[in-house]
Image (cartoon, rainbow, N blue to C red):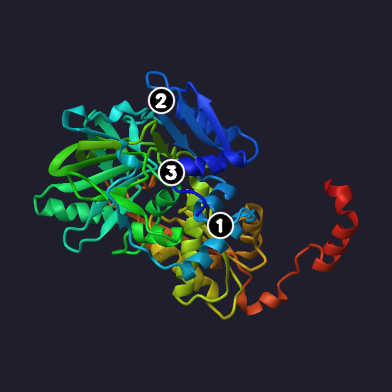
């Protein structure tokens, strides 16, 4: 890997001119609104944004948004060459890595930059950092957005971390929401069922690769540390917390350590989520009593501002999710998958497109059904579109054209009911169970007569290449 921590990562990003530094933005809505404007109104590649000189906070106490939201920054994060230019090239490189990567357990060390400052007991104040209020209707300030919530299974001993949201209640208490079915929720519930406190570590500034691992479906029983270490090609260095013994990254920026007590609940939410809605309202959620805070000098609070797409972390979510679904489809026996794209408009989950080269009757339906229910694609999905190999799944015009011209609504749509969803789903009324349905739209040429389907109106590859060779300089100079 070309970097060791988020600071070296940002130095590299600044080197290829994709880092914007802004001074003077307020934590109360202004950072969030600026980030939204960059992704909705900006032109060209959206930069990573580093806020400093936040009113009311010391210079050097910074926040970072959009760390991985470009092809170049994603390639850097994953250790891929800068020659990768497109989303589909990124996905293919990620898939190739998945086929060869071997997990590497973390390495426990005694010292690391995260120990430069340690606040304990009454000295703990999580609001000493410029925690933003992201959206106008949010229930409070959220310190945990681009984060790792670290827990350990009390029976099996393995360590999990996930990107679950964390809302500040006061200087020493934060509430954390975990969607039903997520590994962190399962581990937390085991402690609560025994009427025991659940040890928790919240890391809110870290290597972007760890955040990518945190936000995606890693197999049950596999620690995200092992997974990320495999991608790094070396063990992630960790330090054991003084109170919990849980491992946190030695090169992290800010870490909160504490415990959640069964029955100790406070209202959490609402929060503007990746679906583009304040979908989950507010509800009582477990509270972490923060006992220790570890942080570097001039710490960087890593943030993600979800909202109406596109947002400042969606590209990275879409790339990784697409690669994982593609990999799981092949492992399930689906041949001839040509590409997968989890569209930004679906938050990287709700609108997924699969391109295949049809090989037998039923192939396209099989591909759609598996994509909708494999581990990486099952949670809070909505639509799976299956297209032929001549359609680029990341090209929205191509996909919509295939739906409009190759599908027949009466024959081409399958519905699956009572699938895995959750409270973040805006189509589930507040307080209702977390089921939804899936639509599989078969936008492939009908297999029985696909070779007789009307020819596409476009230049042959030979004519296109010859024309480009003759006219490219005049057309595209």
Q: Can residue 280 be seen in this view?
A: no
Residue 407, image x, y percentages = 60, 64
Query: Label 3 neighbourhood size at 10 Å, few (<14), some (14-19), many (20+)?
Result: many
Asked whether the residues under the numbered discs 3 and 2 touch, taking CB atoms below 8 Å apart as contact, a structural biologist would say no
Asked where in the image residue 86 lies, by quadrant, the reply is: bottom right
Q: Residue at x 59, y 49 (%)?
A: 72
Q: Is residue 373 visible?
A: yes
**Which residue ends up furthest to the left in the rendered image?**
195
Query: Label 2 neighbourhood size at 10 Å, few (<14), some (14-19), many (20+)?
Result: many
Q: Which of marks 3 and 2 is in front?
A: 2
Numbered label tally:
3
Q: What element carries label 3?
A: loop
Of callouts 3 and 2, which one flags the residue occurring earlier in the amino acid sequence?
A: 2
Look at mark 1 in the image and give the residue it sits on: 80
Closer-to-camera residue (448/103): 103
Is 7 drawn above or below residue 338 in the view shown? above
Q: Residue at x 22, y 37 (%)?
A: 292
Look at mark 3 in the image and give the residue it sits on: 274
Q: What element carries label 2?
A: loop
Asked whether the residues under the numbered discs 2 and 1 touch, taking CB atoms below 8 Å apart as contact, a structural biologist would say no
Q: Is mark 1 on a helix, strand or loop?
A: loop
Residue 107, image x, y percentages = 32, 57
Look at mark 2 in the image and give the residue it sits on: 27
Closer-to-camera residue (176/51): 51
Is 284 drawn above or below residue 159 in the view shown? above
Residue 189, image x, y percentages = 18, 53
Of callouts 3 and 1, which one flags the residue occurring earlier in the amino acid sequence?
A: 1
| Horizontal side, residue 51 vs residue 426: left or right | right
Residue 410, image x, y percentages = 54, 65
Is 98 drawn above or below residue 228 in the view shown? below
Structural distance between the alpha carbons of marks 3 and 1 = 27 Å
């Amino acid at each position: 890997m070309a970097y060791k921590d988020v600071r070296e990562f940002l130095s590299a990003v600044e080197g290829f001119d994709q880092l914007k530094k802004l001074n003077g933005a307020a934590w109360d809505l202004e950072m969030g609104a600026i980030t939204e404007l960059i992704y909705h109104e900006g032109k060209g590649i959206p930069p990573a944004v580093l806020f400093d000189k936040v009113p009311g906070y010391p210079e050097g106490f910074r926040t970072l948004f959009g760390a991985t939201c470009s092809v170049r920054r994603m390639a850097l994060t994953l250790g891929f060459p800068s020659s990768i230019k497109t989303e589909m090239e990124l996905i293919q490189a990620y898939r190739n890595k998945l086929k060869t990567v071997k997990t590497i357990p973390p390495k426990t060390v005694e010292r690391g930059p995260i120990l430069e400052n340690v606040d304990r007991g009454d000295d703990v104040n999580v609001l000493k950092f410029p925690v933003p209020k992201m959206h106008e209707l949010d229930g409070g300030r959220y310190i945990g957005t681009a984060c790792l919530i670290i827990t350990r299974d009390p029976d099996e001993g393995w360590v999990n971390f996930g990107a679950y949201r964390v809302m500040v209640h006061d200087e020493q208490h934060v509430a954390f929401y975990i969607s039903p079915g997520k590994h962190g929720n399962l581990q937390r519930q085991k402690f609560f069922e025994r009427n025991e406190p659940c040890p928790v570590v919240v890391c809110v500034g870290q290597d972007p690769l760890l955040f990518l691992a945190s936000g995606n479906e890693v197999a049950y029983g596999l620690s995200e540390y092992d997974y990320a270490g495999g991608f790094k090609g070396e063990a992630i260095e960790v330090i054991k917390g003084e109170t919990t013994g849980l491992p946190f990254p030695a090169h992290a920026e800010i870490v909160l350590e504490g415990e959640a007590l069964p029955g100790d609940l406070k209202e959490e939410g609402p929060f503007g989520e990746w679906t583009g809605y304040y979908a989950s309202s507010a509800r009582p959620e477990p509270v972490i009593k923060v006992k220790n805070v570890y942080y570097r000098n001039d710490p960087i609070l890593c943030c993600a501002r979800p909202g109406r797409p596109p947002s400042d972390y969606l590209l990275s979510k879409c790339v990784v999710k697409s690669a994982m679904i593609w990999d799981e489809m092949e492992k399930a026996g689906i041949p001839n998958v040509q590409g997968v794209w989890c569209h930004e408009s679906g938050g990287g989950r709700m609108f997924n497109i699969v391109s295949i080269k049809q090989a037998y009757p039923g192939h396209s339906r099989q591909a759609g059904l598996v994509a909708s229910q494999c581990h990486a694609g099952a949670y809070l999905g909505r639509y799976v579109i299956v297209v032929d190999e001549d359609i680029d799944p990341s090209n929205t015009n191509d996909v919509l054209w295939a739906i409009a011209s190759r599908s027949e609504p009466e024959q081409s749509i399958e519905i699956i009911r009572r699938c895995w969803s959750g409270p973040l789903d805006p189509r589930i009324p507040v307080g209702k169970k977390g089921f939804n349905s899936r639509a599989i739209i078969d936008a492939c040429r009908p297999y029985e007569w696909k070779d007789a389907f009307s020819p596409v109106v476009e230049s042959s590859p030979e004519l296109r290449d010859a024309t480009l060779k003759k006219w490219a300089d005049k057309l595209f100079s």
